[in-house]
Amino acid sequence: MSEIWAIIVGGFLLLIVYAIVSSKKSEKRLREAREKMLPHLEEAIVTDRRHHLFLSDGRRFMDVRILGATDPKLAPSPLGDWGSMLVILLDSGKKAFIRPSSVRCIEEA
């Protein structure tokens, strides 16, 4: 009787392994097909350049420098947990902190 259970459990394990391998192969094929249609670029925001930021609420920050992002673990805000914030330098010399999820487009100036 224990041999039958061992065979059943082994069969289920083989099905699980087959499903995982099949999923990985399918995902790889889809990624390669997407990259053929539209190549993947190794680009990132350069902090030394000026940018135009367009936010989801319609506000725009034109010709600003992106300084970086805050680490939410280092300095929690007295207003609550805001998470990671994008830090930009305005023309006036002041810094502005923006939630990355509110940025809809970043354009190089």
Image (cartoon, grey):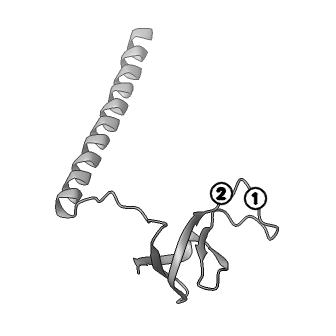
Q: Which quarter shows the N terminus?
A: top left
**Looking at the picture, how far across and down is residue 83, in whole percent?**
66, 63
- Mark 2 is on which residue type? Asp
Please name the residue shown 37% across and 32% down the image.
16
The crowd level at tag 1 (other Cα within 10 Å; few <14, some 14-19, many 20+) is few
Front one among 35 and 59 = 59
**Looking at the picture, how far across and down is residue 86, in whole percent?**
59, 69
| Residue located beneath label 2 in the image | 71
Tag 2 near tag 1, CB within 8 Å: yes
The crowd level at tag 2 (other Cα within 10 Å; few <14, some 14-19, many 20+) is few
**Looking at the picture, how far across and down is residue 94, in whole percent?**
67, 80
- Mark 1 is on which residue type? Ala
Please name the residue shown 30% across and 35% down the image.
21
Q: Is residue 34 visible?
A: yes
Please name the residue shown 45% across and 72% down the image.
49
| Residue located beneath label 1 in the image | 75
Front one among 91 and 24 = 91
Q: Tell me, for residue 98, which label it has, or none.
A: none
| Quadrant housing residue 77 | bottom right
Q: Is residue 1 visible?
A: no
Residue 68, above or below 88? above
